[in-house]
Image (spheres, coloured by chain):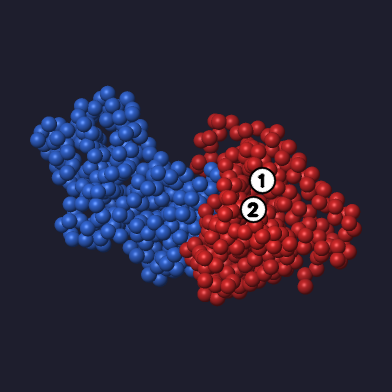
Amino acid sequence: MKTNDMTKMTYRDAIRLGITEEMRLDRDVIFLGEDIGVYGGAFGVSKGLLEEFGEERILDTPISEGAIVGTAVGAATTGLRPVCEMMFMDFITLGMDALVNQGAKMRYMFGGQSQVPMVLRLPAGSGTGAAAQHSQSLEAWLCHVPGLKVVSPSTPAQAKGLIKAAIRDNNPVCFIEHKMLYDAVGLVPLDEDYTLEIGKTIVERPGKDVTIVAYGTTLAKAIEAAEFLDEEGIRVEILNPLTLYPMDMKPIIESVIKTGCLIVAHEAVKTGGVGGEIVARVVESEAFDYLTAPIIRLGGLDIPIPFNQELEAVAVPQRNDFVHGVYRLLNRE
Amino acid sequence: MIELSEELLLRMYYKMNQARYFEEKLDDLVSKGQVHGTIHLAMGQEASGVMACLALEEGDLVSLSHRGHAQAIGFGLDVNLMMAECLGKYTGYCKGKGGSMHIADVENGNLGANGVVGGGFNLSCGAALTQKYHQTGKVVLCFAGDGATNEGSFHESLNLASIWKLPVVFFIENNQYGMSNPIENHMNIENISDRSEAYNMPGLTIDGNDFLDVYNTVTKALRYARAGKGPVLIEAKTYRYSGHSKSDKQVYRDKREVLEWQKKDPLLKMKEYLRENRIFTEKQILKMEEEARISIEQAVEFAKKSPQPQLNTILEDVYA
C-alpha cells in the first residue's frame, strides 16, 4: 500500500508493523524465538503474529539461543530470510558462536559464495529493574565483528524503517531495541515501502554550539538537555548514528567542524564502548583542528547494572550529565 | 539389501582412493613446507566420509567437519579446486580466503567445512528447516567428530531437529580421539549413538571402516528423514592414522594401536570385497587406483600453477 499517511504508535507496535509488512510481502521471511507464539514475545513485539502467519512461519523455539541463531544462519544461507529474537540482548552470549564464527564470516571465508540475510533482534538496556544479567548494552562486541551490521533505532518511525531495511538486507543485521523505548509513541509512516537506509547517521536536531552524538534511550536524554539549554540560548546539534556498524562518520565530522565541541554518549559501559571509536575517528579526521575543548565521553559506569532503582539510574548517563557537559565545554561552569 | 551397480562400486572405490591420495599428497606438501597453515587429515576415515556422501541424492546438502577432505570428495567437489584452496590460490573454492578448513561449494549444497568443532550442527538444522519449509524433499547430512558431541550445540540441535522433525542426518565420525584425548576420557558411554535416545530419534552405531555398512546405513537414514519422519543419528566408528593437525607429535597413543587399525583399513577392506566377489579384474582395480592417483597429481599441478589472489581482493566479500 502506497500512502503518505502517518499514524501515532508505540515503538513496540512499529517494530511489529515492520515485521508484519515484510512477512506479507515475502513468504521467505520467517520469525523464530522463545515464547514468540501464543505468548506474543517477552515484550509483546510478536503479539498477534501467530494468528496471522501460523506455526509454520512463527516458530516458537526451545530455550536454546545457540540453536536459534545457528538455525537462522543455516536457514538464511539456504534461501530463507529469518528474523530471530533473543529474549534479552544479554543472552546473545549463548548464541555468539553461531553469530560471530559462522554467520558473520561465511561469505568472506567462502570467497563470496554465500549470503546470510538474517535479522537478530536484541532487546537491550537498563531501567527495568532486571539487574545485571538482563540489562546490558553489548553493542560494542557486535561492532567488533566485520560481516555484521548493527543498527539501533531510537523512535517508532526509525524502528519501522530500520527493521524493514534489516529484513531486506542480505547480511546478518543486529537490531538493537531498547526496552525502555517500547512504550514510546511517535508518528510512523504507513507506507509499505518506507525504509531507512542502513549505514546513515542523521542529524536529529540542528544546532551550532556543541555537537552531541547519542543513540538508544540516551538520545532522548540528550534531546531533553538540548531543550533545556535552548532556553539559555545554547544551540546543541544532536546526531544519531542509527547504524552503529559500519558507521557513517561524515555528518559527525562535519558537525564537529561547525561546533568545535563534542560529547559522545551511550548507556553501554564507557570502557571499550562505541563512543571511544567515534572519538578516535573524529580526532583522526580534519575535525581535530577545529576542536576548541577536550572531547567528553559519557558512558555507563564500568560496573554490572545494579538492581536498586537509584543505583540503576546513576549507572548510566542522565539529562543533567549532558547539561553539565555542555557547560564545561563552553566554560560556563 | 541395497543394490550396488558396477558403476557405483567403481565410483566408490575411485573416490576412496582419490581421498587417500589427496591427503597423502597434501601431507607431503605440508612436510615440504609448501602449505601455509595447518590441515586436518582423515586418512583411515575414507569409508565413512566418502560413502556417507555417495548415499546422497541430487540436491541434498552437507555440512562438513574440519576433517573434511574425504567428505568433500565424496560429495563430488572438484579435487583441482580443493587442492588450489588448500594452497591458498585464487582458483580455489574460496578464492584462497578459506583454506583446507573452510572448503565450501554453497551453490551445490556443500555448506562448508567448519573450523569450529560442533559449529555445523545448528547450521544443518537451519538448512533442513529451509528444505522442510520449501518442501524440496531434500535432506541435510551433517558431519561431525566424536569430540563435537560434547558441545552444547550438538544437544540443542538434536533436540530442535527432533521436535520439528527436520530432514537431517547427523553423521558422527568417531575416530577415537578428540585431538589428544581418547574418547573414554571425554564421555562415559559405550556408543555415541546412545545419545539419540534422549531426543527420541533413531541412533545407530556402525563400522565406519566398512564401506557397505556406511553406505547402506546412510541410505536408509536419508530415506527415513526424507519421508518426514525426522532426524537420525549415526555413529561410524573409525580411526585417523595421522595426528590431529600438522603440529601433533602423537605422544598420546601407541604406534601399535595405529598399526592394528591399519589392518582394518577401509580401502583394503573394499579391495578385498571387490576381489572376493570378482566384480572387477585385478587389472581394472589397478586402473582405478592409478586414475585416482593421476587425478591428484593433476590437481597438485593445477594448484601450483594457479595464481595467488590479488592483494586488492582482500576487502571483497565481507558484505553481500
The residue at the far left in this view is A333
Q: Quadrant of residue A35?
A: bottom left
N-terminal-most mark, 1 or 2 = 1
Q: Quadrant of the N terminus of chain B?
A: bottom right
- Residue B98 placed where, x, y %? 57, 44
Give the amino acid at mark 2: Ser
Q: Does residue B189 appear in the picture of this structure?
A: yes
**C-alpha separation, residue under disc 1 versus residue under disc 2:** 9 Å
Q: Is residue A175 above or below residue B193?
A: above
- Residue B2 placed where, x, y %? 77, 70
Residue at the spot of label 2: B242
- Residue B159 placed where, x, y %? 51, 69
Q: Front-most of A318 and A269?
A: A269
Q: Front-most of B12 and A15?
A: B12
Give the amino acid at mark 1: Asp
Tag 1 near tag 2, CB within 8 Å: yes
Task: Report the residue at 34% width, 51% height from top.
Answer: A138
- Residue A197 placed where, x, y %? 41, 42
Task: Report the residue at 69% width, 68% height from top.
Answer: B207
Residue at the spot of label 1: B27
Q: Secondary structure at mark 2?
A: loop
Q: Is residue A261 above or below residue A214?
A: above
The residue at the far top in this view is A289
Q: Which numbered disc covers residue A133? A: none
Which chain is rendered red in the image? B
Task: Report the residue at 26% width, 55% height from top.
Answer: A304
Q: Does residue B199 appear in the picture of this structure?
A: no
Task: Determine crowd level at label 2: few under 14, some 14-19, many 20+ residues with C-alpha closer than 10 A.
Answer: some
- Using the image, name the chain to which the residue with label 1 belongs: B
User: In the rendered picture, chain A carries what hue?
Assistant: blue
- Using the image, name the chain to which the residue with label 2 belongs: B
Q: Front-most of A45 and B148?
A: B148
